[in-house]
Amino acid sequence: MRFGVHCVLYGPETGTDPQAVIGRLAKTGAEGCELGERFFGVDRREELSAILADNHMELAGMHCNGLKLMDLLEQPEAAKAALEKVAGFMAPLKNKNVIATGGVPVEEMRLRPIGSGALRPELHDPEKVKELAVALNRIVREIRKKYGVQVHYHNHSWEFADQGLIWFSLAEYAPDLKFALDTGWAAASGFAPLELMRRYPGRFDYIHLRDCRPFEGDRQEETFEQVHKGFVNLGEGQMHYPGFIRGLKDVLGEEAWAIVEYEIGNFDQNSYLGAVHYLRGLQDMADEYRKEG
């Protein structure tokens, strides 16, 4: 497994000064980074390639911000166009990974319990959710055929409402889709990341690493904002990272990407420096554990 870091920590600076951002990330020891279309755009590939080469970094994946779950039901061509825009950017690059979040109006959800899921009733209807999963699979298959890239779905909390209705529907009815599993949001929603990966082998070669603060009571009653602000430095929360990394070694291939995702307001550059060193140490320990086992 290869370790990368997410540029979202730097927000708009990713677009205005990518040399500085990627230079900082390279100093963490990470092998690659993930950029977001939201801040960097999709029309500066040559510039980005030069910056990455200068810093001995790879672009692990590009995050697509234009995919909306409701578009898959109401205007699937808009959903396809959003994904194609990023797929075209990634097609000539080494790591052909498009990371797509199924957008919902987050501002409307911030103060709502995560267990309530998205606001639109269609996203709580098993038949409608199956319909959107089938529509997304068709788009993902067409994009892979045309551009040679793989779309990975990146979850938040709403996919795990209703006993995981959206997430499991995508797993069952969109077999050409892979998952950029956000381990922190899955765990906060009550689903063990390793169990999800073991249940659907072959669907994971790109994940996002977070850690959740310890909590008491029913986390489903916490608001989206409370959970979002409750992510902590890797190893400081409830996810038991030494054992977690050992488990990941069993379900992820050597070329899989594990991307540390820290965000503005919660963390700073030192968080990435510490995380990559911590993860490499845990990976070394896991390798020794496997040898002895």
Image: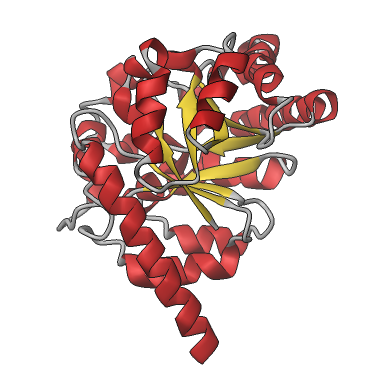
Residue 101 in view (yes/no) = no
Residue at x 57% of width, y 11% of height: 44
Residue at the left extreme, as displayed: 216
Which of the two residues, 240 or 51, is positioned nearer the viewer here? 51
User: Which quadrant holds residue 245?
Assistant: bottom left
User: Which quadrant holds residue 192?
Assistant: bottom left
Percent coordinates x, y for residue 141 in the rendering: 79, 31
Which of the two residues, 69 or 260, is positioned nearer the viewer here? 260
Q: Is residue 110 above or below residue 272?
A: above
Residue at the right extreme, as displayed: 145
Q: As drawn, is 51 to the left or to the right of 229?
A: right
Percent coordinates x, y for residue 26 in the rendering: 41, 39
Q: As drawn, is 289 to the left or to the right of 250?
A: left
Percent coordinates x, y for residue 91 in the rendering: 73, 25
Q: Pick the quarter of the image with the N terminus.
A: bottom right
Residue at x 30% of width, y 44% of height: 272
Which of the two residues, 209 or 169, is positioned nearer the viewer here? 209
Q: As drawn, is 7 to the left or to the right of 180?
A: left
Q: As drawn, is 1 to the left or to the right of 75?
A: left
Residue 269 in view (yes/no) = yes
Residue at x 31% of width, y 52% of height: 275
Which of the two residues, 73 or 62, is positioned nearer the viewer here? 62
